[in-house]
Image (tube, grey):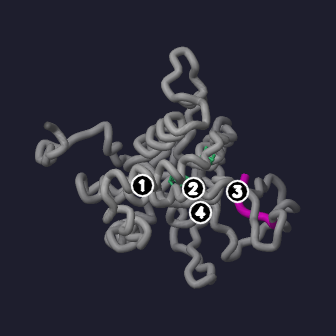
């Protein structure tokens, strides 16, 4: 199988294309609208269960996802053939390499640029607020959340068969769409994605009420990079940041 993109419902949208026959390849498109990180389909659709290889079109964020999914034992990298590409100034360029290890140098250079790339004027404005102003800002943003969980469904890193919010005995996260329930959901999700989010933007684009999830993702990525020198998706053997420690960690967070 090859997983790529085909035309979507509007001229500027693309949808996943699962190619099983040569004829199906006729619909394949690759252009600057192919922005969705497709890596989640590898695990959510059980496509690797027959142990056959799958080729998949991925941008650098998707290639980092493959590393995380492999590090978390969700897939076998030997089954994945990467058709790498990137989009800059609306131009698509092919990336050299096929196996995930071959993109290590590229990912290293993305990590070096991350401190600048993760900056965002609105994020800096929020950081300049008082805690009370910041709380009010997020309370207002989260008040629009309708608990549709589209952000979860679109995220390649949200692969749990049964999400904590779908569990009602005990009910860890309030399912109602009110201030407490919305804070619980969005904060639990932010921590769950800490050190795992690759910044692909799938969640942000999926949110039907335009909550700026990218700001939360960028902030958490800044924190784990600054505090632990951890950049998500560096390799398929990278240890998860919240499940590992180094002896020289500063431990400034321990009271
Ligand atoms: S949290 Fe959002 S930006 Fe991060 S990996 Fe998941 S879908 Fe992509
Ligand atoms: S996609 Fe948006 S509205 Fe839906 S649960 Fe996520 S944050 Fe809430």
Residue linked to disc 4: 58
Please tell me whether mark 3 sits on a helix, a strand or a loop.
Answer: strand
> Alpha-carbon distance for marks 2 and 4?
25 Å
Instruction: Name the spot of residue 184 as percent of width and height, x first.
Output: 47, 36
Kindly tell me whether residue 62 is visible in this rendering: no
Residue linked to disc 2: 211
Name the residue located 65 percent from the left edge and 36 percent from the top edge.
49
* Camera-side mark, 2 or 1: 2
The answer to the question of whether label 2 and label 3 lie on touching residues, with beta carbons closer than 8 A, is: no
Report the front residue among 36 and 58: 36
Name the residue located 85 percent from the left edge and 60 percent from the top edge.
24
> Alpha-carbon distance for marks 2 and 1?
25 Å
**Which quadrant of the figure has residue 3?**
bottom right
* Mark found first going from the N terminus, 2 or 4: 4
Kindly tell me whether residue 30 is visible in this rendering: yes
Classed neighbour count for the residue bearing mark 4: other residues with Cα under 10 Å, few (<14), some (14–19), many (≥20): many
Report the front residue among 222 and 1: 222
Magenta residues (range)? 1-7
Horizontal side of residue 248 vs 15, given as left or right: left
Residue linked to disc 1: 233
């Amino acid at each position: 199988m090859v997983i790529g993109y085909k035309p979507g419902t509007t001229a500027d949208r693309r949808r996943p294309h699962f190619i099983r026959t040569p004829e199906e390849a006729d619909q394949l498109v690759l252009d600057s609208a192919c922005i969705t990180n497709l890596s989640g389909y590898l695990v959510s659709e059980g496509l690797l269960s027959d142990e056959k290889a799958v080729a998949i079109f991925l941008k650098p964020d998707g290639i980092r996802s493959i590393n995380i999914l492999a590090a978390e034992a969700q897939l076998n990298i030997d089954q994945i053939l990467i058709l790498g590409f990137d989009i800059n100034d609306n131009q698509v360029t092919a990336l050299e390499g096929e196996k995930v290890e071959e993109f290590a140098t590229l990912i290293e250079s993305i990590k070096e640029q991350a401190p600048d790339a993760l900056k965002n004027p609105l994020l800096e404005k929020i950081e300049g607020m008082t805690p009370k102003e910041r709380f009010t800002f997020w309370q207002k943003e989260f008040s629009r959340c309708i608990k549709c969980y589209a952000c979860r469904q679109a995220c390649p890193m949200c692969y749990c068969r049964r999400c904590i919010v779908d569990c009602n005995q005990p009910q860890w996260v309030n399912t109602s769409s009110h201030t407490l329930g919305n804070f619980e959901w969005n904060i639990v999700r932010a921590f769950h994605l800490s050190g795992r989010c690759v910044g692909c933007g799938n969640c942000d684009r999926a949110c039907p009420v335009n909550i700026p999830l990218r700001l939360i993702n960028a902030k958490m990525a800044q924190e784990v990079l600054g505090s632990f020198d951890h950049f998500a998706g560096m390799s398929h053997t990278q240890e998860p940041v919240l499940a590992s420690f180094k002896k020289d960690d500063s431990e400034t967070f321990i009271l």
